[in-house]
Amino acid sequence: MPLLADVAVPVPLSQAFTYEVPAALAGEVRPGARVLCEFHRRKLLGVVLAVSERSAAIDPSKIKPLAALVDARPALPAELLSFLQELAAYYFAPIGEVLRLALPAIEREQVRALKAQAELDGVLDLGRAKQVGGRKVAYASATDVIEEPGTLRGQAAAVLALLRANGEQPVARIEERFGNARNALKKLAERNLVALDEREPPRDPFFRRAEERDVPPELNAAQAEAAARIDAALAALSLPAPPGGGEHRASGQQEPRRVAQEPRPSAFLLFGVTGSGKTEVYLRAIKSCLERGRGALVMVPEIALTPQLVARFRARFGDELAVLHSGLSDADRHAMWASLHGGKVRVAIGARSALFAPVPDLGLILVDEEHDGSFKQEEGVRYHARDMALLRAHRAGAVCVLGSATPSIESVALVRRGKLVELRLPDRAHREASLPEVSLVDLRRFGAGPSGDPLISLPLHRALEKTLAAKEQAILFLNRRGFAPSVVCGSCGTLTTCEACSVALTYHRGRRRDARPPSPAGAPAPMAPPDERPEGGRLRCHYCDYAGPLPDRCGACGARNLLLEGLGTERLEATIAGSFPEARVARLDRDVAGKDRSQAILARMREGKIDILVGTQMVTKGHDLPNVTLVGVVNADAALGLPDFRASERGFQLLVQVAGRAGRRDRPGRVLIQTRNPEHPAIAFAAAHDVPGFLEREIRDREEVGYPPATRLALLRIDAVDEGAARGAAAKLAAHARTCPEGLARRVEVLGPSAAPIARLRARYRFRVLLRARDRGPLRGALAALAGLIRDGLDRNVRVIIDVDPVAML
Ligand code: ADP
Ligand code: ZN
């Protein structure tokens, strides 16, 4: 029987293709290795999924031999390869596209070698595979060998001491301190006290400055308990891996076992209030993982915003840390990848995409700020890095820790179902620090303060003055409004919502202006420019496609005072600068923040060179700024007005997180929340620091309206240049979903089709169909039925994306 390989090629198809392994390569072609294979007369870079001796299911004469082997050592370790296949199956994503998320760049030397191979007469198509290659840098590290006491002197002794204290260093960096370092290193290497090797250097900004090693603080009781529980779970890992973990599968077609549905004492939710010292628990967990000979992966929402966090990791673990982020050059990324893949570095930290890092002997995955929406990839393969972290850890037989001060409802539901073990840190870590005092400013009662701008009420104005007088710092947080405004009552603050879906209705102007987002808005207040008064136009629900006229008065209080919700940071910055001319004011949002700019602004804030920082969500992200004593939330209602069943949850998380920036050290913090909805649960519970109370209530609400985690969702996103084609395809998909066996049994509810909230984007008309089910099984069944229709039953010009467990509902 021939030796056959299943190979995934980078085309948007979900199946693998069969090739014959030539005798010369038998024994060398292994799963996870890249190969060149002929595909429609081109030579493509594919990935071997499985190799076996068997008779072919198709005509043997049609099976081509593999053209060449690219990786002697598989680029994707078995653990990662099988995880990627499960991910592809879970999201109904083409396996070739999924593999690309994890594949490293290809080295130029390899490309040259491949081109040189005579049999390569066909076109070599490396597709989007990145190529890297070039300069190598020498590194030195201390070995385990111990010298005879007293046999080392001078620089050799000093260099060895440095390496032992700080871990591996580039030779060039050692030379900066010791003029004779090369000689000393040569001597040390001859005696096996030091190992020298060459590799591509990390030129990453995170590594520009050497970080002094820190001294770990003594853990408080809650931290110690959490660390001990995690340590115990890590200790249990040394036992044999659970069956199924680490083995690879023949193809990407199988149904993965349910995500996070099996009992797993090794997955935790670290629920600690802001500033409770979660990071310190992470550091201990990593240490204990490394001591057990296994690698660790740390995922954070936005690494560019968290240089401080990376610095803390480096202060503890030195440069033996791969920092993966979008700012890396291809060469740097590849160097990081190679050091993990080769086992030189055992800890990786990065944003969402770090999920695919080839961490050796994975023993631990940490997801910091697990509630953060940025863990969901919203283009290409639409995976959720937090959900997949649980899956990867489970499959690898690793421990997973999700951490947050405001856990996601999904994670809380997993705790309740016994799938996650909750660990709590109830108090701030610094003894003197306590949670800030929160007061609500009811905008229905307070108008504009002295600045004349309704965004700055009198209480907020006074609080800012006090903060400036005390030479302390303030953060003003302004939520970015949605893509389309919601409608709120200026008198009672009630938000106009859909009766069927209980999400905010969005306001759409007349047809003419429908296609573009509304102009930058003013305040939802008397000062609002005339065009911010909603007139004409219609209100829409983007879940059930309800559309109706704009009412002329508030449904709750009857006042004829309906306003559009939404306002801008830029205007707020100008107002603040005008009202407090002596203050140094800066702004942090997507518009001003390039990669380095945001770090620079935060650094200036930390150095006390800014008095008032105005910003969007970016100011809420976990910064530890000791001198911030005032946090002002300019308009808490804006977050709640998004047409999304998670609007309340997100609004709550934002409020708690931004409040958590105040009073992190000895000076007490104060938070002012301006709102027209002081009774809204997201606001009331945030003001009371009552996270469990909010979670409890929100879980009940979700159960009532039938949204996750009470149910499972999948969103079909349909778009086309031609409106009729898109609409037609959406209708066809919805009808098919309703009549397929799963749909008929009414176990899958089909909502829509409806126009997407952004009805037209980049010249394409967008529609959606939402599928909802109590259980995942029927939902998957319906999706599988639809996948067939999508593949070959629709207008070719229509694009359909299946978004499993959607997050952005836009
Ligand atoms: P979180 O990640 O929960 O927001 P951090 O880990 O940033 O909190 O901790 C907040 C502050 O408390 C940091 O400055 C940290 O160095 C400090 N800290 C953490 N644990 C301890 C401890 N056990 N003793 C003293 N200080 C601590
Ligand atoms: Zn609705």
Image: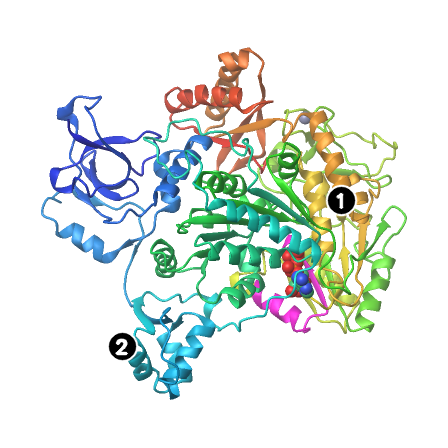
What amino acid type should be assigned to the residue bearing mark 1? Asp
Query: Which percent across, then down, holds residue 618?
Result: 63, 55
Q: Is residue 491 left or right of residue 373?
A: right
Q: Quadrant of residue 577?
A: bottom right
Q: Where is ligand 2, by quadrant?
A: top right
Q: Quadrant of residue 586?
A: bottom right
Q: Residue at x 54, y 11 (%)?
A: 744
Q: Is residue 100 left or right of residue 70?
A: right
What amino acid type should be assigned to the residue bearing mark 2? Glu
Q: Residue at x 48, y 67 (%)?
A: 318
Indicate which disc residue 190 carries.
Answer: 2
Q: Quadrant of residue 647?
A: top right
Q: Which residue in the structure is indicated by mark 1?
A: 637
Quarter of the image containing the C terminus? top right
- Most extreme residue toward the left is 118
> Quick one: SS at disc 2?
helix
Q: Is residue 587 left or right of residue 629?
A: left
> Quick one: SS at disc 1?
helix
Depth check: give the residue in front, 12 or 87.
87
- Most extreme residue toward the right is 445
Query: Which percent across, then down, holds residue 154?
Result: 39, 88
Please report the bounds of the magenta region as a residue range.
598-624
Q: Residue at x 84, y 68 (%)?
A: 466
Residue 725, compared with residue 87, is above or below; it is above
Residue 402, compared with residue 64, is above or below; it is below
Depth check: give the residue in front, 44 or 461.
44
